[in-house]
Amino acid sequence: MEARRRSLHSSKTFQHEPTAKPSPDAVSLPLYVTNAVFFTLFFTVVYYLLSRWREKIRTSTPLHLVTLSEMLAIVAFFASFIYLLGFFGVGFFHSFILKEDDDSNDVLLKHDSRKLTPCAQALDCTVFTSPSPPLVANEDDEDIIKSVVDGTTPSYALESKLGDCKRAASIRREALQRITGKSLTGLPLEGFDYGSILGQCCELPVGYVQIPVGIAGPLLLDGKEFSVPMATTEGCLVASTNRGCKAIHLSGGASSVLLKDGMTRAPVVRFGSAKRAAELKFFLENPANFKNLSALFNKSSRFGRLQSIKCAIAGKNLYLRFTCSTGDAMGMNMVSKGVQNVLEFLQNKFPDMDVIGISGNFCSDKKPAAVNWIEGRGKSVVCEATIKGDIVQKVLKTSVEALVELNMLKNLTGSAMAGALGGFNAHASNIVTAVYIATGQDPAQNVESSHCITMMESINGGQDLHVSVTMPSIEVGTVGGGTQLASQSACLNLLGVKGASKETPGANARLLATIVAGSVLAGELSLMSALAAGQLVKSHMKYNRSSKDVTKVSS
């Protein structure tokens, strides 16, 4: 047992203590000078040895017969190679050795009765750590923190220098606390895979924000049931949407129709005159040219397929709105690459064309815009349901007549009085944003994705209620971005739309868009009922108010 404890202690020490640093008293050159010397030495001796060996082959001299200069060159080669490998390859070997060390620990602890938590899941390995491990594991981390604080080491370069995303986040977090003098206690660091966001989701991480996820449903949509994940901190939102789902389910479900599917990107170009700008407009809108332009656009992706180009002119400036299908991706990067191909072609055909920007806001992305409301962007969906009169009374606690009148005066007339743009609804953005965060969508795109008009009318002699939501610009994807993170991927899996559709490209993203619309329908139905019945304030006072003493919490 004593030997076993020594082995475990040795393993722990190796994992948290990097290679010892040289004495600070040693004479050292600046790092860039040392690197330059060894780079030059390495490539010089390689060139020399290759030249010598080529000469020996040409003269049929045995390769193993080496001169003194060749021996010195070989020594210099190995010396420079070892230096460069140590400088640039230490991260790889360090991770490899740690893996071997973890494997040996698994063997040593095979019969240990304590339950081990896998380190690969970015959780604490409690077998090797104390109950309250310090943030800074060793002296080397302390030196790096000081170098970040004094500006010697850029904070953004920690991941590449250390080769350990979790350690980089920990060091950056501590440096930030020292620089600002503010504590980050309460912002979790442990329990997250920081490697999964490197280079794609978030830069300079210092932790992660916890947002609870609730489930509304089942939502009966197009004959299938969906449990809808909603990430939110607003009380009543999930409960209200859940009530709407219940009313829809008891009335036989909702149905949806996908009207359009196409992501847009609109670069802005400029000419010396309005006449030249108009010439390009006529060229792009000529059906005879679409085939060639489409071929240029489509070669950028297997899934990106150009659908249309619509132009708008403002003086000498021309805005080109490209629309294309994007498979199961939300598609902004995909359409941008295709647009770049077409612009390069147009630059040759119209050499006086000046590309001002690949996005000229005629797209329009993450801004309320009439072009999205009228033309659509992403997925255009309409979703409807007929709610039986007795369900309106028993579940929604109101009447058909009251709902129809309120919808006309609030969602239609009231929004018109406010000059709303795409906001002819009660709270579509509430549901859109909650589902977006839960499923890894871009939350900022709730701006145009929440464009919605809610319609209600009495049918069957005033006995039942027909309710619908029309949403022309739902921008969603099931691959790329935040959809690949573990939590968001789990929510997509719950809905049955995780990843790309293997049968029909784009099917998962389209289904997700209809689920979003169906969830909005449920949310609209429930909130409007609460307003009509005068229950809104009462329910929010009950479910959306903290019972904690805020003064004590803040102190």
Image: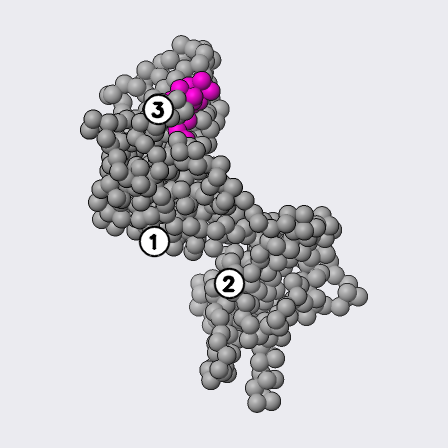
Q: Name the amino acid, label 3.
A: Glu
Q: Which mark is residue 405?
A: 3
Q: CA distance from mark 1 to mark 2?
A: 21 Å
Front in this rendered view, residue 107 or 188: 188
Callout 3–callout 1 Cβ contact below 8 Å = no
In percent of width and height, residue 89 lies at 55, 63
Neighbours of disc 2 within 10 Å: few (<14), some (14-19), many (20+): some
Q: Name the amino acid, label 2.
A: Ala
207, above or below 370, in the image: below
Q: Give the residue pinned by disc 1.
A: 493
Front in this rendered view, residue 94 or 193: 193
Give the left or right position of residue 396, taking residue 71 as reference: left
Question: Which of pointers 3 and 1 lies earlier in the amino acid sequence?
Answer: 3
Question: In what element is the residue under mark 2?
Answer: loop
| Residue 281 in view of the camera | yes
Query: Residue sitting at 21 percent across and 45 percent down?
Result: 223
Q: CA distance from mark 3 to mark 2?
A: 54 Å
Q: Give the residue pinned by disc 2.
A: 122
Front in this rendered view, residue 83 or 451: 451
Question: Which of pointers 1 and 2 lies earlier in the amino acid sequence?
Answer: 2
Highlighted magenta segment, given as a residue range:
412-427
Front in this rendered view, residue 148 or 116: 116
In percent of width and height, residue 106 lies at 48, 78
